[in-house]
Structure formats: structure tokens, C-alpha cells
Image: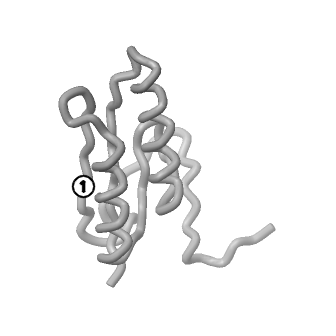
């Protein structure tokens, strides 16, 4: 069963290693969802994908310097997200029109 999650992170970028971690976290998240703000991704995943993503992110972040949050959204995106202003979210489950 697929579920909607929100991933939010704050990586300490004061060092070269921190900037590298920031890029790695973003790349890992891009494989499972789409960026909706600089350090926020909306993802739709199954249990296996969620566990893979969680493990990958935990390998990257430094738990003493960084913050990682995974929010489990109960319901469809339309039910749980209010968006104001620029919203570039693309629902890939809907037909894409050129």
C-alpha cells in the first residue's frame, strides 16, 4: 500500500562535509518524490521504498549536526495539504498533458 510522506531536513552546511551531505540528502529524496520547498520533499512510497529511503537518509545525515523529519500524511495530498502561493507539485498518478 502506498502512503504519502513529507520529508524535511536541515543539514549543517558550515563545513565542506555538511554541504556534501546536503546534496546527498536532496538526491536521495529526489529518487522517491518531488521537492516542494528547498529542504522539503513530498513523496508517495510503499513500505519497502520508505524503509530504503529512511535507511539511506540515516546513512547520510550526521545526527549530532543535522535534523531529519519524516511526516506520515494520513489521506490523499488534497486532504492533508493546504498550499498557498507558488505550488509546482505534479501529480504523477494523473494523466500528464503536454
Question: In this rendering, is residue 41 above or below 62?
Answer: below
- Residue found at the very far bottom of the displayed protein: 1
Q: Is the N terminus in the top left, top right, bottom left or bottom right quadrant?
A: bottom left
Q: Position of residue 94 (x, y in %)?
A: 59, 76
Q: Residues within 10 Å of mark 1 (few under 14, many from 20)?
A: few
- Residue found at the very far left of the displayed protein: 64
Question: In this rendering, is residue 94 above or below 9?
Answer: below
Identify the residue at horizontal 24%, vertical 55% (top origin): 71
Q: Is residue 62 left or right of residue 97?
A: left
Question: In this rendering, is residue 62 above or below 4?
Answer: above
Q: Position of residue 87 (x, y in %)?
A: 54, 47
Q: Position of residue 12 (x, y in %)?
A: 34, 23
Q: Nearer the viewer, residue 16 or 32?
A: 16
Q: Secondary structure at mark 1?
A: strand
Q: Position of residue 57 (x, y in %)?
A: 34, 50
In this figure, what is the number of numbered marks? 1
Identify the residue at horizontal 36%, vertical 61% (top origin): 53
Identify the residue at horizontal 40%, vertical 43% (top origin): 40
- Residue hosting label 1: 71
- Residue found at the very far top of the displayed protein: 14
Q: Nearer the viewer, residue 80 or 64?
A: 64
Asked where in the image residue 84 lies, by quadrant, the reply is top left
Identify the residue at horizontal 42%, vertical 26% (top origin): 17
Q: Is the C terminus in the top left, top right, bottom left or bottom right quadrant?
A: bottom right
Amino acid at each position: 500500500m502506498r502512503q504519502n510522506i513529507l520529508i524535511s531536513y536541515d543539514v549543517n552546511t558550515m563545513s565542506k562535509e555538511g554541504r556534501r551531505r546536503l546534496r546527498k540528502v536532496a538526491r536521495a529524496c529526489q529518487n522517491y518524490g518531488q521537492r516542494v520547498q528547498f529542504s522539503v520533499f513530498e513523496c508517495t512510497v510503499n513500505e519497502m521504498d520508505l524503509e530504503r529511503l529512511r535507511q539511506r537518509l540515516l546513512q547520510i545525515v550526521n545526527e549530532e549536526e543535522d535534523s531529519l523529519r519524516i511526516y506520515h500524511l494520513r489521506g490523499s495530498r488534497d486532504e492533508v495539504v493546504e498550499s498557498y502561493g507558488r505550488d509546482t507539485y505534479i501529480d504523477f498518478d494523473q494523466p500528464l498533458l503536454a
